[in-house]
Amino acid sequence: MATPDHSEATIAAIATPPGPGGIGVIRISGPAALAVLQTIFHPRNPPQAYRSHRLYYGLVATPTTGVTLDEALAVFMRAPHTYTREDVVELQCHGSFLVLQEILALILTQPDVRLAAPGEFTKRAFLNGRIDLTQAEAVIELLQAKSRAGAQMAADQLEGGLHRAVKTIRDNLLAVRAIMEVAIDFPDEEVEIIDPAELRQQLVAGVREPLVELAARAGQGRLFRDGIAAVILGRPNVGKSSLLNSLLREERAIVTAVPGTTRDTIEEYLAIKGMPVRIIDTAGIRENAGAVEELGIRRSRQKMADADLVLLVVDATAGGPIAEDWELLASVSGKAVVLVINKCDVAAPEAVAAMRNVNPRVPAAVISAKTGAGIAALEEVIFTTVAGAGQWEPGHASVPNVRHEAALKLAMAATDRVLAGLAAPLPPDLIAVELQAALDHLGEIIGETTTGEMLDLIFSRFCIGK
């Protein structure tokens, strides 16, 4: 366990977002935290000594003039039982950003205090051993979560789910490396020390299979964290805006019988089975459009090019397949597509069937955007088209970011080279090199072998105050 580094400067920052609110929090961490509190805060009932983790009510005032800046609650938390494992002070003030800025400016005039860098409080928590790197990254994942499932995934990681999974794999690698080290130290007894078949079995069951399982969840983790962009595409008046309203369960887009009503894209967020979806309604695509409508059509095509999923809406009342619909379908080849057959409430069943049978390989859903019929089934089709049949469940370690996924793949490749070396067989010292490489790649995930530059990059994504 790391020892807190109290030689660092004391840092301070506003920990709540800008704008008016009921409460605003200023956080101070470092060896001068208590001295700052004693200088600028005047408790209504002054204690002989501040007790750790206890709230005090009083006034924040400028020491030189005695001018009151705010009334507040203050708490002093003594190291190491704090977020950063340093002495920490939090001032809970009124949520006026002007007042918070004035108090922060006063704090920054105190000796040995400076403004915190982005993510510096969490970085100190990591450097002082309170959390590992996966837990530190989970903090920002939680702050940026776009769905309940994404937030739960980050919360599980914050509790150490990914750390435990990686540590178990590393422990299994260390056990094999220990055997290799003995074989290197006592080469004359190599045959007795190393049983290649047994070590291969141990590596497959304890290292490679868990790595494969974690890597398989990487794509799913990204889906629940970042979500997808889905574009609603189709000819004018097929019900694209009505579909947007049905998915959102509110009247977001104007719906009329006049072709070309939607001239620009409309974007909203929703969650489908916990997966964030940025849904984009677009202008109807047709030939011989007016100049203004043509601009909307160009933007529609651009959004389609950038989308992860295309919802191609067709009108079932047309009596069957329309050439323009299938030209649009052909134009989105290479994209994930769901065929949305709309207006089933007024269309003939045989017309709906004809629409479905044009391309059986394209997943389809039959709906009425007007009545809401089939919307739940459409959401199921959207989810399975993008995420597959599986669904993330709380309690399963996930791999939510690209850095983790890349390190896992490198660790897996090194493990495969170890397995090949045991089968060859190669000398123990060569196999030990690949074992160490696998350990280093896994160490990058939890922060044991991560470079300073990478740490700076990770924590630069945080806001100031966290």
Image: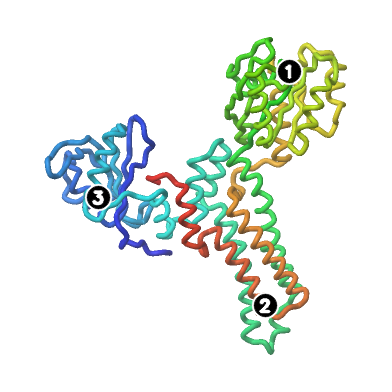
Ranked by sequence position, the earlier of labels 3 and 1 is 3
Q: Position of residue 221 (x, y in %)?
A: 62, 45
Q: How many marks?
A: 3
> Label 3 to label 1, Cα distance in Å?
76 Å
Left or right: 137 in relation to 229: left
The picture quadrant where one finds residue 406 is bottom right
Instruction: Give the number of the disc on residue 31.
Output: none
Q: Are marks 3 and 1 in contact (CB under 8 Å)?
A: no
Residue 188 picture location, percent across and down: 69, 89
Q: Is residue 187 above or below residue 465?
A: below
Q: Amino acid at mark 1?
A: Asn
Crowd rating for badge 2 (residues with CA inside 10 Å; few <14, some 14–19, many 20+): few
- What number is the disc on residue 51? 3
Tell me the kind of residue under disc 3.
Arg
Label 1 or label 2, whichever lies nearer to me, is 1
Q: Which mark is residue 288?
A: 1
Residue 174, image quadrant:
bottom right
**Pointer 1 local density, CA inside 10 Å: few below 14, some 14–19, many at least 20:** few
Which mark is first along the chain, 2 or 3? 3
Residue 225 lies in what quarter of the image? top right
Helix, strand, or loop for circle 1? loop
> Of the residues tagged 3 and 1, which is closer to the observer?
1
Please identify the residue farthest to the left as the structure is shown: 65
In percent of the image, x 74 and y 26: which residue is there? Answer: 312
Q: Which residue is mark 2?
A: 430
